[in-house]
Amino acid sequence: MSTISAAPSRAASASLITAGVLWGTGGLAGAVLSERAGLSSVAVAVCRLSLGGVFALLLLGCAGRLRALPRTGAALRRLLAAGALLALYQACYFAAVTLTSVSVATMTTIGSVPVFVALAGSVLERRLPDLVTTTSVMCAVLGLVLLTWSPGDASGGGSLVLGLACALTSGAGFAALTLVTRDTVEGLDPLRTTAFGCLVGAVLLLPLLALSPVPLGDALWPVGADVLAVAVYLGAVPTALAYGAYFRGLAGSRPVVAALSALLEPLTAAVLAAVLLGDDLGLTGWCGAALLVGAVAGGYVRPAR
């Protein structure tokens, strides 16, 4: 059995927290892009992944690192796996949003990620999760419910069941991405994984884009300076930079800590909505936010074993 580190390094902690916060700004940017450009959720996902991959490639090019790309079988398998899991995560999440609601889909998807990662870790390491991990995951799930749950979103019958299944599949996909990309591959750093993983994911989502209610031409080329600015931000910041930071942080932390850090995404989005859009979280929402902060902090102060 491998030795379990006590807590992430400072650099890994900073990278994971940065990723979670930047992802939270992506929700607002994606909503603005969808509204102003008239894009479907699938079109926004394709735009996000493709632009994120392009910006990561530009960073690689500016650093002179495109010529040294690894051409090994291990690197190819890693990039294909990362792209496929990114596509699965995005497609199933947006399907869950369509079948249920944004709050139910977000709560189920993000809330299930640390649960899946903790369970997978227990199976792989052949031991039960420690008390700190179990408490952090339970606080994370409860906090996310309090932050995002709305009783009016619970209706839907068969659509709700199917939507929950899609959300759980999305969460399992992100959990698998966390576990698969944790171990490093020679010559394949976080930025390269981000660049080619996003591009592969965008290509895999193109068939779904053809089924989108938005005309294909409009989806692929949203015009307008404001729309272009939002699209650039969505691809550069909460995609290229955020996933690059997340993959970097994975190398120096336990997977369950990285999964808990992803909870900063809905927390950041909720706080931004309250501050910028005037949404009222209420006492229940702020209690949920406090639980999420406590759950994330619990992963970082885990005692040595």
Image (cartoon, rainbow, N blue to C red):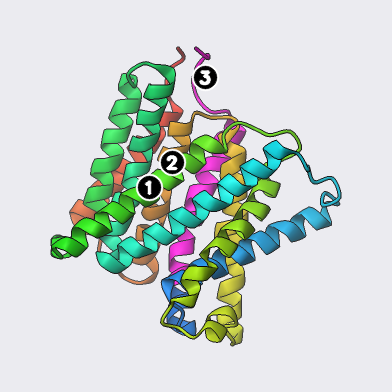
Res 276 quadrant in image: bottom left
Residue type highlighted by circle 2: Ala
* Residue stretch rendered in magenta on the structure: 1-30
Residue at image mark 3: 5
Under mark 3, the amino acid is Ser
Amino acid at dot 1: Gly
Q: CA distance from mark 1 to mark 2?
A: 6 Å
The reply to whether dot 1 and dot 2 touch (C-beta < 8 Å) is: yes
Q: Nearer the viewer, residue 132 or 120?
A: 120
Q: Is residue 76 above or below residue 37?
A: above
Residue 261 picture location, percent across and down = 44, 41
Identify which residue is drawn at 38% across, 58% down.
92
Label 1 Cα crowd, 10 Å radius (few <14 / some 14-19 / many 20+) = many
Q: Earlier in the sequence, mark 2 or mark 3?
A: 3
To which residue does mark 2 refer? 175
Q: How far apart are labels 1 and 3 at the CA level?
A: 25 Å
Label located before the other in sequence (1 or 3) = 3
Q: Quadrant of residue 15?
A: top right
**Residue 245 vertical position relative to residue 118 in the rendered view, above or below:** below
Residue 76 in picture, x, y percent from top left: 68, 44
Q: Dot 2 lies on which element?
A: helix
In three-dimensional space, the C-alpha distance between marks 2 and 3, rounded to whole angstroms, equals 20 Å
Instruction: Tell me the mark number nearer the camera, choosing from 1 and 3.
Output: 1
**What residue appears at the point 48 percent right and 52 percent down from the top-left corner?**
21
**What secondary structure predominates along the stretch shown in magenta?**
helix
Res 183 → quadrant: top right
Q: Which mark is residue 171?
A: 1
In the image: residue 65, left or right of residue 253:
right
Residue in the foreground of this view, choosing between 36 and 204: 204
